[in-house]
Amino acid sequence: MDIHSTTIFSMLGTWAFLPTIITVIVHIAFSAAVFADAQNLKKDEGLTFAGPIIWSLAVVVGGVFVALTYWVIHHSSLRRY
């Protein structure tokens, strides 16, 4: 019985990194999308607060919530107020 519990715990340790890996992938994907969009906005209308690189780095660190903030500032109807 001791052998099986050790195997189960080692498998759980391996699978524990899966949410972290998924989170990192999502942050990088959102960061790339924000960077590309910010590049287009910089050419067309201008950006608020920071340039594309700063927005991209902020999304890498802050994740989906910073990407949502970027969208609200630059693309939502609240932008007009």
Image (cartoon, helix red, strand yellow):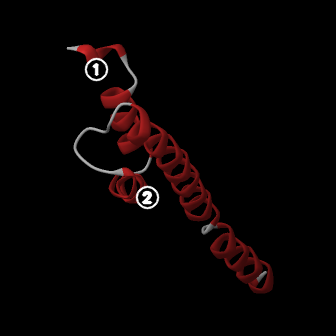
Q: Identify the image quadrant of residue 3.
A: bottom right
Q: CA distance from mark 1 to mark 2?
A: 23 Å
| Left or right: 5, with 71 as reference point | right
Give the residue displayed 39% in from the left and 58% down from the top. Answer: 53
The correct choice, above or below, for 6 with respect to 46 in the image is below
Q: Earlier in the sequence, mark 1 or mark 2?
A: 2
Coordinates of residue 65 in the picture (x, y in percent):
38, 41
Image quarter (top left, top right, bottom left or bottom right) of the N terminus: bottom right
The correct choice, above or below, for 3 with respect to 12 in the image is below
Q: Which residue is mark 2?
A: 60
The correct choice, above or below, for 17 with respect to 29 in the image is below
Q: For the residue carrying disc 1, how many other residues have a C-alpha within 10 Å: few (<14), some (14-19), or many (20+)?
A: few
Q: Nearer the viewer, residue 2 or 40?
A: 40
Q: Nearer the viewer, residue 24 or 47?
A: 47
Element class at badge 1: helix
Q: Nearer the viewer, residue 67 or 54?
A: 54
Mark 1 or mark 2, which is nearer to you?
1
